[in-house]
Image (tube, grey):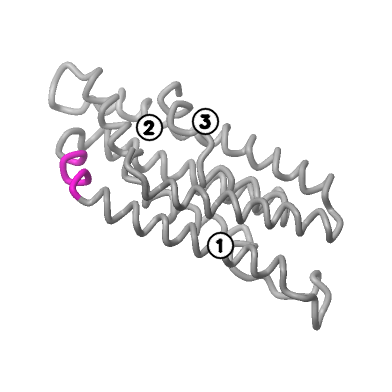
């Protein structure tokens, strides 16, 4: 669980995205996004626990291109968030407008899961932890299962806390102006973090 908190707690683009989704839509959407992050962390923890050094060595050469793809997706999300916040309200009321993008629980889960899987640093982090504590090259299945479950639970609990915080912010800023401010702030933060993703570690 400590390993899971270690990768989940630093606030990056994904945490901002989860919080922004919860603030602009509902806790259900934010929670689905949070579980998408936790699922990706659990998958990477499982890959690291079972694959170890071999997986880390495969991912390291493509870390640069994956960072570029992640930055492009984040920048696209930032632009889209700002666009929908700034466009004039025409046609049906927001309640009657069909949901698009990451504004439904299933789409939020799938979209954030895919985006989180673009972060190769997560599997390298978990692999380093696993290899640092392993006495043999063969994975110990009970220990590996406990490691994966702990990483998933830690990530899920933290990301759900982030979504809850976003939901509270959304309730406080529920009016049109509040939604505009939170959407533009979220968009600016995601764009800045997209640029930061391209910088060397």
Which label sits in the foreground, 3 or 2? Answer: 3
Label 3, secondary structure: give it. Answer: loop
Marker count (numbered): 3
| Residue labelled with disc 2 | 148
Question: Residue farthest to the bottom?
Answer: 91
Q: Nearer the viewer, residue 36 or 8?
A: 8
Residue 157: x percent and y percent?
Answer: 57, 32
**Residue 9's mark?**
3
- Residue 57 sits above or below residue 62 on the image: above
At horizontal 55% and vertical 52% (from top left) the residue drawn is: 190
Residue to which mark 1 is pinned: 107
Q: Quadrant of residue 44?
A: top left
Q: Is residue 180 left or right of residue 103?
A: right
Residue 139 image offset from top left, x and y in percent: 20, 28
Q: Are marks 3 and 2 in contact (CB under 8 Å)?
A: no
The correct choice, above or below, for 75 with respect to 88 in the image is: above
CA gap between label 1 and label 2 equals 24 Å
Label 1: state its secondary structure.
helix
Write the start and end of the magenta stretch as one range: 55-61
| Image location of residue 112, percent across then percent down | 50, 53
Residue 91 at x, y = what percent?
A: 80, 83
């Amino acid at each position: 669980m400590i390993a899971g908190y270690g990768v989940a707690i630093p606030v990056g683009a994904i945490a901002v995205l989860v919080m922004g989704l919860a603030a602009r839509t509902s806790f259900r959407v934010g929670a689905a996004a949070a579980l998408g992050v936790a699922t990706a962390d659990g998958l990477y923890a499982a890959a690291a626990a079972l694959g170890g050094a071999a997986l880390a060595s495969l991912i390291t050469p493509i870390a640069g291109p994956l960072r570029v793809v992640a930055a492009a997706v984040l920048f696209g999300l930032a632009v889209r968030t700002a666009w929908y916040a700034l466009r004039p309200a025409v046609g049906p009321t927001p309640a009657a407008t069909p949901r698009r993008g990451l504004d439904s629980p299933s789409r939020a889960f799938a979209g954030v899961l895919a985006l989180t899987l673009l972060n190769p640093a997560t599997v390298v982090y978990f692999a380093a932890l696993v290899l640092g504590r392993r006495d043999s090259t063969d994975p110990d299945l009970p220990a590996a299962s406990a490691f994966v479950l702990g990483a998933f639970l830690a990530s899920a609990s933290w990301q759900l806390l982030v979504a809850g915080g976003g939901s509270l912010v959304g309730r406080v800023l529920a009016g049109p102006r509040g939604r505009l401010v939170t959407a533009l702030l979220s968009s600016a933060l995601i764009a800045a973090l997209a640029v930061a993703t391209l910088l060397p570690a």
